[in-house]
Amino acid sequence: MNTCAVGAPRGPGCNHCPHHGSQGRLGVHELLVAAAARHLIRHRASAAEILQTALAGGMHTLRKDGIEKVLQALTDLSEVMAASNG
């Protein structure tokens, strides 16, 4: 079994998992819920300004949610990077 320094261990794979060594699916999530962001969107603020406001309000990005799951050994970093355009 292959192991990463951080993250879930990977098996050698089989015909059921196309030799990936992982099983099942795990979601990574990003959710923007903020009255301040709504105001910015209505007033046509830039994407960077909306993102900055959302992060200041506690929003977790896809990558941050994925990294938290790597640290819990639920997935590995390569999967998170692929899912979060990294």
Image: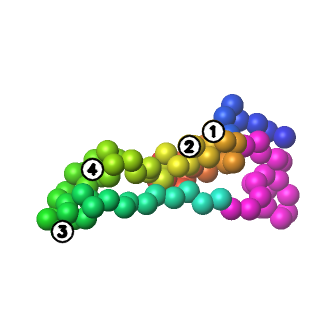
- What is the basis of the colouring in this image? rainbow
Q: Secondary structure at mark 1?
A: helix
Q: Which residue is mark 3?
A: 42
Q: Position of residue 33 (x, y in %)?
A: 37, 61
Q: Say which mark, if any, is on residue 71.
A: 1
Count numbered badges in the picture.
Answer: 4
Q: In this rendering, does residue 84 appear at all? A: yes
Seen in the image, is 52 located left or right of residue 60?
left
The residue lying at 39 percent from left, 47 percent from top is 58
Q: Secondary structure at mark 3?
A: helix
Q: In this rendering, does residue 78 appear at all? A: no
Amino acid, disc 3: Arg
Sequence-wise first label, 2 or 3: 3
Q: Is residue 81 magenta?
A: no
Mark 1 neighbour class, 10 Å CA radius: few under 14, some 14 to 19, many 20 or more = some
Q: Magenta stretch?
A: 8-25
Q: Say which mark, if any, is on residue 53.
A: 4
| Mark 1 touches mark 2? (CB < 8 Å) | yes
Amino acid, disc 4: Thr
Quarter location, residue 47:
bottom left
| Mark 1 touches mark 4? (CB < 8 Å) | no
